[in-house]
């Protein structure tokens, strides 16, 4: 069991760290070359239905859990048709020999019961070759319409036991839902599960909306709206779906807002005349504080996880580059020095990386770099990739990709921080400007 856990930890570390720093001091050292790893093989039979009403959920729950785990790129599911054993009772002994035969390293078993409109899910995780359970069995319960969230919770627990880190499956994403032709596109704010399910709309399409951003606990959303005829920052309560405009001087454009890590402040951009500067505002009240003062375009600010610094984009050097400054303002430090233009920086929740959009030679990329600008890596490439946002555990990035031409559409994609696993997030319509919320 210890070897299995150490292997998984080393594999996960290898995704985000350079080879020279992987698994230092651990019982196993995994050298990853050319950015590839071998996904861990696991099996998840359909969950056992313990009551008649649970039958409709037994297979669906197992499939969502499998989709979550396989979607990370760290795990590979053994196809159900290859299974030798059939799990018909949650309490029955596991036939480990049968699972070793199909080369499963990990086995997930579960059951589901339904009573009075509520379902209860139980699960166990097994180290197949050691023949032992990883941790202890757990159970979750919810109303029947929350069955997908239960599956995500199970997947989060399995992910944590196999990697030692928190998952990101029981989380939501706020984004701009887009429909209609490209020259007359309707946009409205929407919230969905991280995998594109359960889309709910927060605004109508009467006004253009841009750049939604979740609060740290997911109860509020900042966004930019043209409701008044010019861009203004709004704040929306997710529960009541009521919004208000943040105070601003008349005739001044405000946009690109983002919450501080404690949710008490907002950093955003303000355009006056030909200048765009960054401002900081206390949500509880008080006058906004100007943080930058140069005759340039300073925008797209993002806090460090500890709230002490802000990364932003600026053309003060003649082209879009990334800079970091103290939260109180002051002389910023430039961190991007590669070819091309850099924008939309977002600090990882782990504090180790900054994601960004890069434009180079007619192509757009989503990339990451260390907070000092070192070890830049481009994860994607297309005619138009932009707007990265981090998963709660800092291991996956979501962004929007637009196809060119009059019939072009915008869609959401996710990619792991190694650039190995690129996945389209299926939504009912087009999507852009995603912002990942916290674990629920």
Image (cartoon, helix red, strand yellow):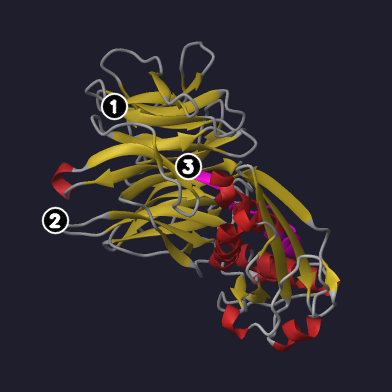
Residue at the spot of label 1: 231
Q: Would you say the residues marked 3 and 2 are in contact, meaning their CB atoms lie under 8 Å apart?
A: no
Closest to the observer, 335 or 388: 388
Extreme-front residue of the structure: 52
Q: Residue at x 29, y 19 (%)?
A: 252
Mark 3 residue element: strand
- Which span is picked out in magenta? 158-173
How far apart are labels 2 and 1 at the CA level? 25 Å
The percent position of residue 32, horizontal first and vertical second, equals 64, 77
Q: Residue at x 71, y 81 (%)?
A: 85
Give the quarter of the image for residue 271. top left
Closest to the observer, 331 or 281: 281
Q: Earlier in the sequence, mark 2 or mark 1?
A: 1
Residue at the spot of label 3: 323
The percent position of residue 390, horizontal first and vertical second, equals 53, 49
Mark 1 residue element: loop
Residue 58 higher or lower than 190, as above or below: below
Tell me if 397 is positioned left or right of 201 in this view.
Answer: right
The percent position of residue 239, horizontal first and vertical second, equals 50, 27
Quick check: can you spot residue 435?
Answer: no
Quarter of the image with the N terminus is bottom right
Q: Residue at x 70, y 85 (%)?
A: 103
């Amino acid at each position: 069991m210890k070897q299995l856990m150490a292997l998984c930890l080393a594999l996960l570390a290898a995704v985000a760290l350079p080879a020279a720093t992987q698994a230092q001091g651990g019982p196993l050292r995994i050298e990853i070359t050319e950015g590839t790893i071998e996904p861990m093989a696991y099996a998840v039979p359909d969950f056992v239905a313990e009551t008649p009403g649970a039958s409709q959920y037994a297979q669906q729950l197992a499939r969502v859990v499998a989709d979550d785990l396989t979607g990370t790129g760290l795990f590979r599911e053994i196809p159900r048709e290859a299974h030798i054993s059939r799990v018909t009772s949650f309490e029955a002994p596991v036939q480990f020999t049968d699972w070793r035969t199909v080369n499963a390293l990990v086995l997930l078993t579960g059951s589901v019961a339904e009573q009075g409109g509520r379902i209860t899910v139980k699960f166990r995780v097994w180290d197949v070759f050691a023949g032992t359970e990883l941790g202890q069995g757990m159970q979750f319960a919810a109303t029947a319409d929350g069955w997908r969230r239960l599956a995500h919770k199970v997947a989060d627990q399995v992910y944590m036991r196999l990697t030692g880190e928190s998952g990101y499956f029981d989380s939501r994403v706020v984004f701009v839902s887009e429909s209609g032709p490209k020259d007359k596109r309707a946009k409205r704010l929407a919230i969905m599960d991280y995998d594109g399910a359960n889309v709910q709309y927060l605004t109508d399409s009467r006004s253009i909306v841009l750049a939604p951003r979740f609060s740290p606990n997911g109860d509020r959303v900042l966004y930019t709206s043209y409701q008044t005829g010019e861009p203004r920052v709004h704040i929306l309560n997710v529960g009541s779906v009521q919004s208000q405009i943040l105070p601003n001087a008349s005739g001044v454009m405000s946009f690109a807002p983002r919450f501080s890590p404690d949710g008490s402040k907002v950093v955003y951009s303000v355009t006056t005349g030909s200048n765009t500067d960054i401002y900081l505002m206390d949500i509880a009240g008080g006058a906004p504080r100007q943080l930058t003062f140069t005759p340039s375009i300073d925008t797209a600010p993002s806090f460090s996880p500890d709230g002490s610094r802000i990364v932003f984009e600026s053309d003060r050097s003649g082209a879009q580059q990334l800079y970091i400054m103290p939260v109180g303002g002051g002389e910023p430090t430039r961190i991007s020095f590669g070819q091309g233009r850099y924008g939309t920086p977002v600090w990882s929740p782990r504090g180790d990386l900054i994601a960004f959009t890069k434009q180079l030679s007619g192509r757009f990329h989503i990339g990451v770099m260390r907070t000092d600008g070192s070890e830049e890596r481009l994860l994607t490439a297309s005619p138009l990739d932009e707007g990265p946002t981090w998963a709660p555990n800092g291991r996956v990035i979501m962004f929007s990709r637009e196809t060119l031409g009059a019939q072009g559409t915008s869609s959401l994609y996710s990619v792991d921080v190694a650039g190995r696993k690129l996945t389209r997030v299926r939504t009912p319509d087009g999507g852009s400007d995603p912002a990942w919320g916290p674990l629920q």
